């Protein structure tokens, strides 16, 4: 297993970019749990914050995540506009929503082994949040935000088009979410719509894990994720696979 410093250097190598401002990279890889909410007379006097505490998230990757989300959205829209010149807004929007979604972001993060480079508080580490899709996706967006602020749009574009190349090339038709595919499959057979049920919500309040079951045709699909919507999507995927249906159309 790599040390964290080694993991950070590994991420830089995967990006093929050496940061001129290493502080941006460090911030992008700092989960909010690793930033103590320090007490102090002169701290937390920003507008809208009670004196005596560091504002929640300050020093973490949340601000860079905000930037990276916009950077990725723009670059992906530009790429799709070039890649599919005959498609209109509806189809392009469906592709875009999929390519910037949390599951895809988390998979990209796993591909560059980002998880080992994220700085997380020990008590959260014990809870296993390092491997949560939400944590990985947020860090990936923050990394893109840091890259943009460090070097501009062209290097960010190069990284996005290299890391997302497999995902954009494999979709011959606009992506449909698993819940939509499940609904279409059932309606096409004249069956009732699926029933989703939230069966559990565990973990810390800022990083809960939801468990959802979906039932149709006497079968049950189960999904777990960091949001109810994503857990429903995972449950639909599980049920579709049990019914012998593909969840992605190549």
Image (tube, helix red, strand yellow):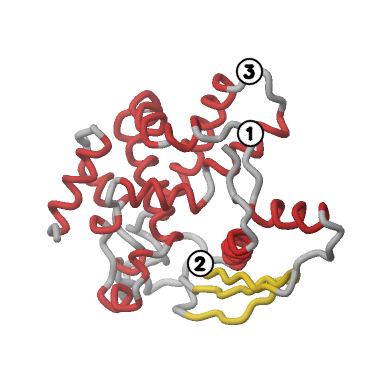
Sequence-wise first label, 2 or 1: 1
Sequence-wise first label, 3 or 2: 3
Give percent across and percent down for residue 129. 37, 69
The quadrant holding residue 136 is: bottom left
The answer to whether any part of residue 64 appears in the image is: no
Location of the N terminus (image quadrant):
bottom left
| Crowd rating for badge 2 (residues with CA inside 10 Å; few <14, some 14–19, many 20+) | many
Q: Residue at x 56, y 66 (%)?
A: 227
> According to the image, label 1 marks what residue?
173
Q: Nearer the viewer, residue 188 or 104?
A: 188
Q: Residue at x 23, y 33 (%)?
A: 17
For marks 3 and 1, give the one nearer the viewer: 1
> According to the image, label 3 marks what residue?
85
133 up-or-down from 111: above or below? below
For marks 3 and 2, give the one nearer the viewer: 3
Residue contact between numbered discs 3 and 2, judged by CB atoms under 8 Å: no
Q: What is the spatial separation of the Cα atoms under label 2 and label 1, in whole angstroms?
A: 28 Å
Give percent across and percent down for residue 148. 37, 34
């Amino acid at each position: 297993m790599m040390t964290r410093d080694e993991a950070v250097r590994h991420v830089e190598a995967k990006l093929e970019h050496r940061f001129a401002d290493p502080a941006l990279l460090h911030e992008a890889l700092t989960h909010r749990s690793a930033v103590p909410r320090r007490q102090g007379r002169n701290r937390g006097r920003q507008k809208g914050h009670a004196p005596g505490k560091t504002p929640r998230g300050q020093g973490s990757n949340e601000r860079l995540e905000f930037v990276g989300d916009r950077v990725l959205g723009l670059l992906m829209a530009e790429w799709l506009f070039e890649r599919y010149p005959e498609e209109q807004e509806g189809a392009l929007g469906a592709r875009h929503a999929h390519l910037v979604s949390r599951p895809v972001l988390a998979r990209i993060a796993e591909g560059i082994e980002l998880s080992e480079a994220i700085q997380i508080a020990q008590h959260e580490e014990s809870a296993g949040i390092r491997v949560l899709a939400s944590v990985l996706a947020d860090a990936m967006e923050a990394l893109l935000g840091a890259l943009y602020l460090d070097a501009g749009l062209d290097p960010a574009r190069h990284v996005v088009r290299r890391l997302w190349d497999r995902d954009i090339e494999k979709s011959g038709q606009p992506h449909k979410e698993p819940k939509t595919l499940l609904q279409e499959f059932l309606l096409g057979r004249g069956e009732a719509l699926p029933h989703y049920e939230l069966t559990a919500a565990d973990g810390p309040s800022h990083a809960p894990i939801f468990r959802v079951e979906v039932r149709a045709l006497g079968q049950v699909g189960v999904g777990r994720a960091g949001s109810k919507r994503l857990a429903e999507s995972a449950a639909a995927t599980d049920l579709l696979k049990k019914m012998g249906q593909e969840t992605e159309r190549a």
